[in-house]
Amino acid sequence: MQNPVLVEVTRGQMVESRHRGMAVVVDGDGAVVMSLGEVEAPVFPRSAVKSMQALPLVETGAVDRYGFGDRELALACSSHSGEPEHMRLAGDIVARAGLSEADFECGCHWSFQQQVLIDQAQAGGKPDQLGNNCSGKHAGFLCLSCHAGVDHHGYVEYDHFVQTSVRDVMAELTGTALGHDNCGTDGCSIPTYAAPLKSIAHGFARMASGTGLGPERARAAQRLMAACMAEPWYVAGTRRACTELMQIAPGRIFAKTGAEGVFCATIPEKGYGIALKCEDGATRGAEAMIGAVLAKLFDDDQELSARLGDWSQKSMKNWNGIEVGVIRPAGALA
Amino acid sequence: MQNPVLVEVTRGQMVESRHRGMAVVVDGDGAVVMSLGEVEAPVFPRSAVKSMQALPLVETGAVDRYGFGDRELALACSSHSGEPEHMRLAGDIVARAGLSEADFECGCHWSFQQQVLIDQAQAGGKPDQLGNNCSGKHAGFLCLSCHAGVDHHGYVEYDHFVQTSVRDVMAELTGTALGHDNCGTDGCSIPTYAAPLKSIAHGFARMASGTGLGPERARAAQRLMAACMAEPWYVAGTRRACTELMQIAPGRIFAKTGAEGVFCATIPEKGYGIALKCEDGATRGAEAMIGAVLAKLFDDDQELSARLGDWSQKSMKNWNGIEVGVIRPAGALA
């Protein structure tokens, strides 16, 4: 089976580039609502599953002990742009457990958002670990470890309490055996596990619907997604896709991207879980795909569906501001 | 026909993302040496054909009038990184025709190379048109116009003398009718024309071999490619693919990338022209493909072939410097 072309990039009147992808939507029972491409193939979900990775933080009571509100929970589930307020809050979170920037093990990088990078460089700043796009997740990991009374050093390692806790939750949610065989190392140094795309979607459908989850986990999942939908800027940042999608339909869409063209989402009111991957790893492809998939799933709300459809198409302008083409859903998503 | 997977991106022991592509190698007579994927499909070559676009500059005698050496010719064929010396030389070139930065019509952008951008922002600088990656080509266009006694204003427009000169040369080299039907607007605002990938490769084979060209054009083509091979840093910049490929085999490979995953090259000693495009537009895909294609074409020089093969594989490290995967040729290019 080939993954179909789901997004095309035009120039003038012609198609210049094409993005193939796989996308699947399931309900809490795992029944397939929509399926395109190789949805049984294993995929590294990367940062798209940060809300799953944050479940132990909620379930153990760490979030209440350290006084996390919606913003802190949203940041724990985020891939943020490293804007000053993102960095401030990441530092504030670990300070509640008596820790600081030096305790993070995620590494440093300049913001992926050019304007944030330029602002920081012009102000004489430079990246530290609080600016790592994963620092919110790592702040949560550090708090989880401290709350459990476990030495936080090496919390990114495969056998550390933090990572075994995360692995157990994700294996249960996705119904997939996770171990060394399907493990890679993520950008921020923690293990990431490849699972069938459909199983990842099913995990999100379980979170959205509570189906098959114990009451404590169902509440924790609901609490995390509600926090992200309430504070979407903390999940990504200014003009970022996750933030904009959750702003388009407040409380009705939870959306989270992952590196290499992954996008996951839930529609709580329908109990749907969504997972997709752009075959070539392109963010622009994944963004157009998730907008188009969500537009189709809201076909019972024409106004919302139209707004999502508009969002899924991006005009491309050149350095003189001339429109030269468009990135748009294609094929089954057109 | 589907474009085959030619590059894969791994994480741990698994393949995480895949790049499909089309690639074709022909000789001066148009005989096919290698062909993968939809090589008759029209492709916007974008900046990969800057050496073709510079031919009128040489053929009209403008380069001699303004005293261009290898560095100026290489910059006229370049997509440079906007490093200070690139910007200085672009300004110097137009000054010879009595013009300045304000006369460019390419627009401004920060360097695509992060370190160059950071250096400029930290030094309190900001982009001007000399830093546009196409400023060398535009400097050549301005000189062409001035040398011909044509008002340079609007030199980026479809009907301006500069663009009709460029279009005529490219139509003849590629044997393709170029006009409004297959025209798009490039990032720097000039027209770009889609032509079958094989026709683009044939154009480069004509440049490399002189086959079918008049003596003046054959000399001009040879002079431009020789300048690029002699001064490869001016064609791209520090740690850039075009520069590195021409440094690996001095005088034996001419290579030039274009936006949206295009790479073109010639092997002068064999008279080959090469054109390829990564279907999804990814630069990382196109770079691995051109390295692998060149490695195969130099199978009669095992040491060079091995160096090109090594170059075509890139280790990917995360923010802590841990190797997490590799970008490598796959399928027919493995």
Image (spheres, coloured by chain):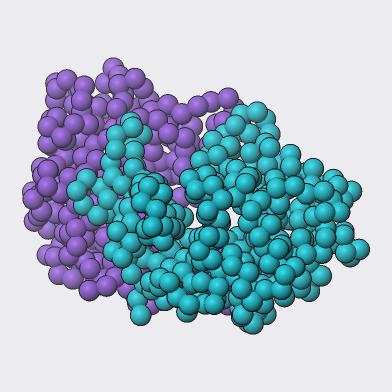
Chain colours: A cyan, B purple
Q: Where's the C terminus of chain B, which quadrant? A: bottom left
Q: In this rendered view, identify the residue nearer to me: A76 or A220.
A: A220
Q: From the viewer's perspective, is B241 left or right of B74?
A: right
Q: Is residue A198 visible?
A: yes
Q: From the viewer's perspective, is A275 left or right of A138?
A: left
Q: Relative to B98, is B160 above or below? A: below
Q: Relative to A267, is B87 above or below? A: above
Identified at 82% across, 48% down, the residue is A67
* Horizontal and vertical percent position of residue B110: 47, 35
Q: From the viewer's perspective, is B277 left or right of B8?
A: left
Identified at 14% across, 54% down, the residue is B174
Q: In this rendered view, identify the residue nearer to me: B303 or B25.
A: B25
Q: Is residue B219 visible?
A: no
* Horizontal and vertical percent position of residue A214: 71, 73
- Which corner quadrant of the image does residue A3 belong to? bottom left
Identified at 41% across, 49% down, the residue is A304
In the displayed image of the protein, which residue is found farthest to the top?
A: B98
Q: Where's the N terminus of chain B, which quadrant? A: bottom left
Q: In this rendered view, identify the residue nearer to me: B40 or A316.
A: A316
- Which corner quadrant of the image does residue B198 belong to? bottom left
Q: From the viewer's perspective, is B157 left or right of A6?
A: left
Q: Relative to A227, is B138 above or below? A: above
* Horizontal and vertical percent position of residue B251: 34, 55
* Horizontal and vertical percent position of residue B59: 15, 38
